[in-house]
Image (cartoon, rainbow, N blue to C red):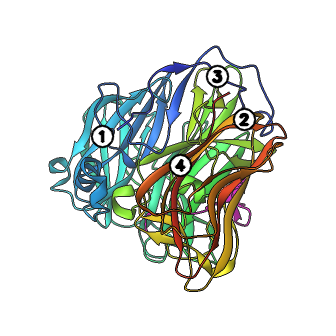
């Protein structure tokens, strides 16, 4: 499969976090390109295996730590076989990068044998203790925490301690967690409680050596179900504690609380802007860190797709930029984008797919109303298992005659675009088509009212957008028993 796209690309208009979302800063000369919705590869061309981890910056180098699960390897080798539940650990991996797109495999921080044969290992973070000079790795290990140390960020970590109880936590131990390092170098664990996960906590790591989690501060209690995938970042003096729904590794809104203090005074919960139309690019919160450069700054959101276990689509890691309107974080769902880590800027990639939830994967369960899309015709619209890729596809069908559509209104730069989708059809409809309209020109469509027994790609090219918006979708004027399935919408600018 394709990699993170390791070639350089000339950036388009850059967005820095220090300006409002949509405002522009001078474009950098070149930027590396991040391609989502694919399996990433490292600089040697091997698959990147890193889930449920975190990133630590040392000098100008970013170190990424995460779990390599045996089930992830199985899924990578044969995605069509579907999801599996093999969470057995191969190793905790280390990758390094200076540009956030090209990742070099540094080796294994710890293997299953280093952890006593392992079991469940996950939610990994690393911080450098200023007193000992050691890099300290913190991870869940079954029902405990395990700590490892190394003299270098990319070295082998030696098991140094375990902890079976965190004081002041309602269930005594963390559910999901991540490590947050503040501007002053102090390190914290951000987490929800084990079992139920409705209580959110921030706890300092023991200052002397980071080999123990100090008594926790309960910063918020969720009244609408538990929270998992807990991450924390700081931007312009404000702390953000963000989490996902308790969906078991499935796609989710991203929920946040904010405060001016690291462990108290947090706001009520709110949904991060931009994460509802496709449930955070069909991910669960996985990691987050601030990228600051010579021209601006933004927050890197690492969405973990857990695709081998939850079946959320191709690609384990989906990294997206978060910018700010004042203190309000804004999530940008992109399939391709350019990043200049040294400048602290980013831009939309030329190959970005502007359709959100294009493969009907975000919603996780069978239903009619899907994230990011609008329907007419009611219950004849649904999602259907057995997509062209992933688990789901869009569907229109009924035992009675019907007239229906599913569509998405998209704001985008003026230019020339190509719309494509993969379809199956019973044929026999009075009319059925993939369409593009309301873009400043006459409606364009590709008819699919013919028998298509296998997935077939249909394409509409030369769509000249002149008013900064477009509506795309599928429509049917059909007889009883007629059906159409659609998957993998794509709308890409090519001029």
Q: Residue at x 24, y 47 (%)?
A: 77
Q: Viewed as shown, does residue 373 lie left or right of 300?
A: right
Q: Is residue 145 above or below residue 73?
A: below
Mark number for residue 458?
4
CA separation, marks 2 and 1? 30 Å
Q: Nearer the viewer, residue 114 or 416?
A: 416
Q: Is residue 415 magenta?
A: no
Q: Earlier in the sequence, mark 2 or mark 1?
A: 2
Q: Is residue 262 magenta?
A: yes
SS label for mark 4: strand
Residue 441 at x, y = what percent? 81, 42
Magenta span of residues: 247-273
CA separation, marks 3 and 2? 16 Å
Dot 2, crowdedness within 10 Å: few (<14), some or many (≥20)? many
Dot 1, crowdedness within 10 Å: few (<14), some or many (≥20)? many
Mark number for residue 11?
3
Residue 71 at x, y = what percent? 25, 56
Dot 4, crowdedness within 10 Å: few (<14), some or many (≥20)? some
Q: Which residue is mark 1?
A: 93
SS label for mark 2: loop
Q: Residue at x 60, y 16 (%)?
A: 30
* Figure quadrant of residue 362: bottom right
């Amino acid at each position: 499969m394709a990699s993170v796209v390791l070639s350089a690309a000339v950036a388009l208009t850059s967005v820095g976090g220090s300006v409002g979302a949509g405002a522009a800063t001078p474009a950098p000369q070149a930027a590396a390109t991040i391609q989502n919705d694919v399996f990433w590869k490292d600089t040697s061309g091997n698959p990147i295996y890193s889930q449920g981890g975190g990133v630590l910056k040392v000098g100008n180098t970013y170190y990424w730590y995460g779990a390599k699960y045996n089930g992830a390897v199985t899924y990578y080798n044969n995605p069509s076989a579907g999801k599996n539940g093999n969470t057995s650990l191969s190793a905790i991996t280390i990758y390094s990068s200076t540009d956030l797109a090209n990742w070099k495999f540094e080796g294994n921080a710890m293997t299953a044998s280093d952890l006593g044969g392992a079991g469940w290992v996950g939610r990994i973070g690393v911080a450098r203790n200023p007193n000992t000079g050691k890099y300290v790795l913190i991870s869940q290990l079954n029902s405990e925490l395990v700590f490892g140390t190394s003299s270098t960020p990319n070295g082998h970590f030696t098991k140094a301690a375990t902890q079976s109880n965190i004081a002041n936590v309602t269930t005594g131990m963390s559910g999901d967690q991540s490590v947050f390092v503040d501007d002053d170098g102090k390190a914290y664990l951000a987490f929800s409680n084990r079992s139920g996960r409705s209580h959110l906590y921030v706890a300092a790591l023991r200052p002397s050596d980071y080999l123990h989690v100090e008594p926790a501060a309960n910063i918020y209690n969720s009244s609408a179900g538990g929270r998992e995938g807990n991450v924390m970042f700081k931007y312009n003096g404000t702390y953000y504690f963000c989490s996902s729904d308790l969906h078991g590794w499935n796609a989710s809104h991203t929920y946040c609380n904010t405060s001016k203090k690291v462990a108290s005074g947090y706001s009520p919960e709110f949904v991060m802007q931009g994460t509802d139309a496709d449930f955070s690019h069909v991910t669960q919160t996985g990691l987050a860190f601030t990228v600051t450069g010579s021209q601006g700054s933004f927050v890197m959101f690492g969405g973990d797709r857990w695709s081998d276990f939850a079946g959320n689509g191709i690609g384990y890691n989906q990294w997206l930029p978060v910018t700010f309107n004042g203190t309000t974080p804004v999530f940008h769902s992109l399939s391709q984008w350019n990043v200049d880590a040294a400048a602290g800027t980013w831009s939309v990639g030329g190959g970005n797919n502007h359709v959100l939830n294009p493969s009907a994967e975000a919603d996780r369960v069978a239903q009619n109303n899907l994230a990011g899309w609008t329907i007419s015709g009611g219950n004849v619209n649904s999602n259907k298992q057995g997509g062209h890729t992933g688990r789901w596809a869009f569907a229109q069908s009924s035992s009675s005659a019907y007239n229906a559509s599913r569509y998405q209104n998209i704001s985008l730069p003026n230019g020339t675009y190509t719309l494509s989708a993969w379809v199956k059809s019973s044929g026999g409809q009075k009319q059925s088509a993939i369409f593009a309209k309301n873009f400043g020109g006459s409606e364009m469509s590709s008819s699919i009212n013919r028998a298509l027994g296998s997935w077939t790609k249909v394409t509409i090219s030369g769509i000249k957008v002149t008013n900064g918006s477009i509506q795309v979708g599928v429509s049917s004027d059909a007889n009883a028993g007629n059906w159409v399935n659609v998957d993998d919408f794509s709308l890409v600018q090519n001029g």
